[in-house]
Image (tube, rainbow, N blue to C red):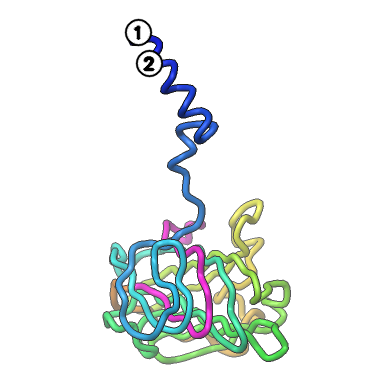
């Protein structure tokens, strides 16, 4: 009788999910966060849509740290998405921390801006020419100290993540419109700022590359 019950459970599990283990697999999703400000039309663990600011619940481990974030989503109209790292203010204002901002233009191309403690530099359009604001998936990485930072951008699902196949590297002058700010973030807060945009993945993880 016990064997019959066990066999029945196995069959039911297989029919329901093909493999019981696969029932727990989740693709995409957002790290735990708290609402800071704005108006979102969707705000849960699977997506963030609209305009506003959220802060990730987990703080960064140290000011002297390197972290990456996977972002997958879409920017509507002439909206934008900003990833914030190493801010020392829980409200994530634009003059604190390291911020990587992507803006959709009226012609549906993508502009980029990196800001460190309120000082900004543009990303050259040629570096973003093959990234579509209507559907993008990127890895953004920040290597930070209190006196310097480095920002790297890859397309997600590259064959490998290395300094030889980046879309943007702030240490490469030809990727930027001017001099990169000689400063670093001074805090442990990170989060997102959306303006008429939609995200289905926002996951912070360890850096893809080690930089001495």
Residues shaded magenta: 190-212
Q: Residues within 10 Å of mark 1 (few under 14, many from 20)?
A: few
Q: Quadrant of residue 84?
A: bottom left
Q: Is residue 186 above or below residue 95?
A: above
Q: Tell me which residue sits at (49%, 63%) in the image.
A: 201
> Whole-percent x and y of residue 144?
39, 71
Helix, strand or loop at label 1? It is loop
The residue that disc 2 covers is: 5
Helix, strand or loop at label 2? It is helix
> Whole-percent x and y of residue 16?
50, 34
Q: Residues within 10 Å of mark 2 (few under 14, many from 20)?
A: few
- Is-magenta flag for residue 118? no
* Drawn side of residue 160 relative to residue 99, left or right: right
Q: Tell me which residue sits at (43%, 81%) in the image.
A: 193
Q: Quadrant of residue 105?
A: bottom right
> Whole-percent x and y of residue 130?
72, 72
> Whole-percent x and y of residue 76?
60, 82
Rendered-image quadrant of the C terminus: bottom left
Q: Nearer the viewer, residue 84 or 21?
A: 21
Characterize the magenta stretch by its predominant secondary structure: strand
Rendered-image quadrant of the N terminus: top left
The residue that disc 1 covers is: 1
Q: Are marks 2 and 1 in contact (CB under 8 Å)?
A: yes
Q: Nearer the viewer, residue 68 or 181?
A: 68
* Drawn side of residue 208 relative to residue 78, left or right: left
């Amino acid at each position: 009788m016990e064997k019959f019950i066990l066999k029945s459970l196995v069959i039911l599990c297989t029919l329901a999910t093909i493999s019981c283990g696969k029932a727990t697999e989740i693709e995409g999703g957002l790290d735990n966060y708290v609402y800071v400000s704005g108006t979102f039309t969707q705000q849960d663990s699977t997506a963030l849509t609209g305009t506003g600011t959220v802060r990730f619940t987990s703080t960064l481990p140290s000011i002297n740290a390197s972290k990456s974030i996977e972002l997958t989503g879409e920017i509507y109209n002439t909206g934008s998405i900003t990833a914030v790292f190493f801010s020392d203010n829980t409200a994530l204002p634009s003059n604190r921390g390291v911020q990587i901002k992507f803006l959709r233009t009226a012609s549906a191309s993508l502009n980029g801006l990196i800001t460190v403690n309120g000082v900004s530099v543009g990303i050259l359009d040629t570096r973003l020419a093959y990234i579509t604001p209507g559907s993008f998936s990127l890895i953004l990485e920040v290597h930070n100290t209190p006196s310097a930072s480095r920002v790297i951008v890859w397309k997600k699902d590259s064959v490998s993540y290395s300094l030889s196949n980046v879309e943007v590297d702030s240490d490469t002058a030809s990727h930027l419109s001017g001099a990169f700010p000689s400063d670093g973030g001074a805090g442990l807060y990170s989060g997102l700022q959306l303006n008429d945009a939609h995200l289905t993945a926002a996951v912070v993880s360890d850096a893809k590359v080690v930089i001495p």
